[in-house]
Image: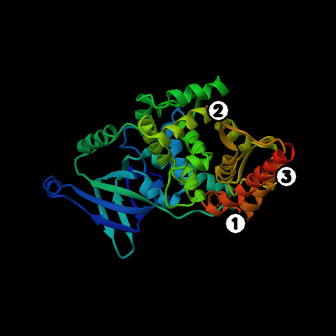
Amino acid sequence: MANTKPSSERTIALSYESIRNLTSPEEKQNGARSYFANIPARELLKLDTEANLRGYVPEHPGKRRTQVHKAIAQTLSDNPERFIQLSGGATVSAIDIDVDDTKKIVRVKRGSIINGAQTQGEIKRFFEALDESEEQEEPHFHVRVEFIVEPDPEFIVATAIARNTSTNVQRISMAGKKKYFDELNDSFQIVFPDKKLSMSETDTGDEFVDTMKLLQILWAMMPESLLPSGKRSVAEARLKSYKNRAYCLVDFENDVINKDADERAGDRYRYFVDMAGQAWREYLKWRHHGNWHGQYLRESNRQVVRDDDALTVSDGMIFPILAAMSNFVEKRGKKWALHVPTFFDEAEMISAARDQLTAHEGSPMLMGRDASAYDTLSLLPKMVLRVAGRMKLLNK
């Protein structure tokens, strides 16, 4: 019979890819040790959070997933192979550990997560969704864990408090505090008067819209003329919107700071403000578009989520479409806006996106991260613009 005692009451075995003893002289003086290991993500689920200040927050009555949880989830979904770099990992306390380098096993005595409970909770949620889908191939990725071997239980508590209270304020909160999103929010509410942009990771109610996601969408839909210059192709530059959520915020902040001194930064900032509500509306339209019905999208492959007759399509399929729609974004007068020719066929765009999904092995993640998908879908609006131009000449 399997041992049902939690990890903090027994010895458990965790497999690892690599482990290093980095015990400092000061720790040795106090009878403590410190190890760092890369362990398969599923192994982290063997540990409890008994010694932590709190467990996984959404499991508590009345608590919701915050922007922090959603950011972790997006990394797991979109970039699992980069998770170990983009995540803070976990800290585990134990009264002793034994490393078996031959079998690549570390035996942890009375181990408990003291920092990283939210990361563990999102990993558990991620794998539960995969297990339910059955057909979805499971990505193999690692989590970096610091093992603190400490014989003094009271010091373990002190360490847990210190590790959990020294976390930096989330960047989204700092930007909100500096009022970087104020004009963006005012413009957004013209289109969505009942919603507002989140200014902090604690803004989690139904009335709040994920500001980080909005910035991703705005970068995806940015006209080519506004994209920062660089060596990458236009399609590759747009991949940032899907792959690098954090950089979308960093680059927006830079434009806010430099908008008065740098003309291009100022132009981009005006685009962000003008397009805030329009871009979100466009995202929602394509994500729930009625023409996705009949496209044989599968929940098991995380292509779509079905709720009765409503569909919510994966971002990996939507972002190449949004990037293609950037061809219709232009400045007329003093305002940036989306100007779509009346004869543009949305059903054709969805059909083309479905073809791209098939070409990428049915994986939205692969589609969203491949520049060729962006290039291919951009051909349709470019063709529409050429036809519109010819019609305009003929009607003169």
Secondary structure under tag 1 reads loop
Name the residue located 87 percent from the left edge and 43 percent from the top edge. 395
Residue lying farthest front? 396
Name the residue located 42 percent from the left edge and 57 percent from the top edge. 85
Pointer 2 residue: 333
Q: Is residue 393 visible?
A: yes
Pointer 3 residue: 294
Residue 287 is situated, as x and y percent measured from the top left of the image, at: 71, 44
- Which of label 2 and label 1 is nearer to you? 2
Q: Few, some or many C-alpha atoms within 10 Å of disc 3 (few <14, some 14-19, many ≥20)?
A: few
Q: Amino acid at mark 2?
A: Gly
Secondary structure under tag 3 reads loop
Mark seen at residue 361? 1
Residue 177 is situated, as x and y percent measured from the top left of the image, at: 41, 28
Residue 349 is situated, as x and y percent measured from the top left of the image, at: 78, 52
The image shows residue 392, relative to residue 203, as above or below, that is below
Q: Mark 3 to mark 2: distance in Å?
A: 41 Å
Q: Amino acid at mark 1?
A: Glu
Q: Few, some or many C-alpha atoms within 10 Å of disc 2 (few <14, some 14-19, many ≥20)?
A: few
Residue 12 is situated, as x and y percent measured from the top left of the image, at: 40, 59
Answer yes or no: do the residues labelled 3 and 2 have beta carbons within 8 Å?
A: no
Taking the image as shown, residue 117 lies to the left or right of residue 133, namely: left
